[in-house]
Image (cartoon, coloured by chain):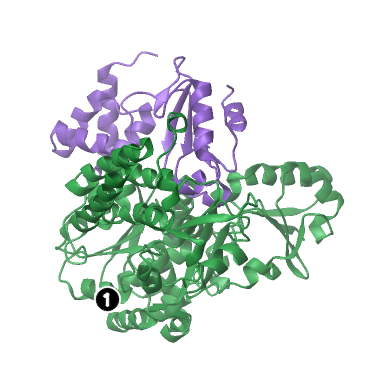
Amino acid sequence: MSIKVYVPLDSGSVALGADDVASAIAAKASKTGADVKMVRNGSFGMYWLEPMVEVETPRGRVAYGPVSTDDIDALFEADFLTGGPHKLYLGRTQDIPFLKSQSRLTFQRCGIIDPVSLEDYRANEGLTGLENALKMTDEEIVKAVTDSGLRGRGGAGFPTGIKWNTVREAKGDQKYIVCNADEGDSGTFADRMIMEGEPFVLIEGMIIAGLATGATKGYVYTRSEYPTAIDVMNEAIEVARAAGVLGDNILGSGKAFDMEVRMGAGAYVCGEETSLLNSMEGKRGVVRAKPPLPALEGFLGRPTVVNNVISLCSVPVILEKGAEYYRDYGMGRSRGTIPIQIAGNVKHGGLYEVGFGLTLGEIVEQIGGGTATGRPVKAVQVGGPLGAYFPKELFDTPFDYEEFAKRDGLIGHAGVVVFDDTVDMMKQARFAMEFCAIESCGKCTPCRIGSVRGTEVVDKLERGEQPELQIELLRDLCETMKFGSLCALGGFTPYPVLSALTHFPDDFKPRALDIAAE
Amino acid sequence: MSETTEDHNVRVAAICDQLITLEGPLLPILHEVQEEFGYIPDGALQTIAKKLNLSRAEVHGVASFYHDFREERAGKHVIKICRAEACQAMGADALGDQIRRHLKVDWSQTTADRKITLEPVFCLGLCACAPAAMIDGKVVGRVSADRILEKVGS
């Protein structure tokens, strides 16, 4: 019988050499006559161990990592195909502490299954949520999602069930489910990981959303920077269509839903739902004023659910195990689990799914293991380029929508980027403004002009021109952007700027000119 | 290989015909045109506009809005270096400076010999293996300037 060997196809793993490792294992196996069946799986999200190679043994799946092509000969000599000892041996995958201590609901099969095998997906309780949903009325599905307490995982935290209900009640001959997979925030990769590692859960979530709202057509709008996610999603959609999961007769129910993937073209602002809709319609990705809400007048002016990937991927487990099961995780008004993405200068970078409520300090120091460089942590940016920088003094903040808001921050799409003590916070504040200037859609003045003026003010500050005045100007400008911008790009750029200024005032002192000239 | 505008028009029109039934076909068409030619030829705008019943200005407005669409052909190799925060935390700024100095180009420029185009990218979703880059469509993590230059033979 052939031995199953898993080497991830996940972009993060491939970026660290997984493709070469897979070829090297295949070549060596054919040379030695070993009967190996290679599965290219998703990643478990432990990127310091990638490329992580797993072997199926009688005692379960065991892992080796991080594996490079130079290790392959030694691994074969150590008889890794039977789980033999080697310096890269990590034990059973499921026992690796980083994985074992998680509560994987949304990502329950990511890494475990062959991403495009519907049999694998079904064998691991996939489609149970959909089967249950097919027995329910639209109202009952919406109620289950509302009762679960699920809130938009894209960052806004709007209750998913309420959004669905608006679309359900809206009149329209055609309604749409649009999955916002335009994951542009630095420090986030949950959408990419799940689309590459478990695409069927997104398909299942979108079909359920369709059943709940009366939408029969879905789109996944994702980034051109994610070619592998696009390929895997497209392949999974084909498989689902051929198996009758998508199409005119979902699992023989007589109900219809179909979907396709659309690719963006490198515009960060298209992660904002109204500019995403414009982009899908073939227009400039310019933000629309609300109202009308996309729920009532969305894609092509029709009622549209726009949900983040992780929101939609959390729906199947809610329908499978019930609203209470999901709601029992978490704290306060932040219910369920959140896939936290730990990134940047961190020892154990990766994806950690857990109920809301861990403190930022636990995430960075215990789970993340501190910095990769071994230097002290200085700042942590939570929630992408529009999220606030937190100093160590605020490490007791629990990971929760409201708790972060109380401290002038946001959890956004749950990306946590760690910086060591070499970071220059004035430079980071300038970058936030520069990024906003590059990516602004240009529709509203506070964002379009404010961001450019913002970089100029920081430059003056750096040159030491009337520093007190510049700081006052910068705060005033941030105020205008925050309250005067049409969307979160201009509206939230002040978060990183003001948090840097407030928590790290020493970094905003004028520099000697020779440094500034660099 | 010489290409006449007429050749372009025929190929662009064929792409339009193939994709026009999609809901919101313009972005898929522009992607396909760029895939075909390596950039969006100026003449393509008029052809697309005609097919979709838009003005040339509208098509130009869309093509120029998005960072991905090029007005001229890129170099033989395209290096995209992530400039976003997670990569900054692992030295992406210094990496970008090194590469720019070595290639003697700034962001979004092509070397004089048309061999290499350097572009910034804001996040490749490889934030846990920073700094990251994409070279000719292939991702690399925890990358150094030497490795990037080696991959493009510079």
The hue of chain A in the figure is green
Query: Residue A406: percent from the left, percent from the top?
Result: 36, 71
Which of the pair A27/B149 is nearer the observer?
B149
Give the residue type that dot 1 points to.
Answer: Ile
Image quadrant holding the N terminus of chain B, namely top left
Chain letter of disc 1? A
Query: Residue A183: percent from the left, percent from the top?
Result: 40, 53
Can you tell which quarter of the image residue A298 is in? Answer: bottom left
Query: Residue A151: percent from the left, percent from the top?
Result: 36, 72
Left or right: B134 in relation to A206: right
The hue of chain B in the figure is purple
**Residue sticking out furthest to the bottom:** A324
Name the residue rendered at 27%, 50% in the picture. A472
Query: Residue B66: percent from the left, percent from the top?
Result: 30, 39
**The residue tagged with tag 1: helix, strand or loop?**
helix
Name the residue rendered at 34%, 47% in the picture. A268
Which of the pair A263/B110 is nearer the observer?
B110
Image quadrant holding the C terminus of chain B, namely top right
Name the residue rendered at 40%, 46% in the picture. A508
Residue at numbered disc 1:
A162
Which of the pair A329/A213 is nearer the observer?
A329
> Where B73 sits versus A82, above or below?
above
Residue A68 seen in the current view: yes
Q: Residues within 10 Å of mark 1 (few under 14, many from 20)?
A: some
Left or right: B143 in relation to A293: right
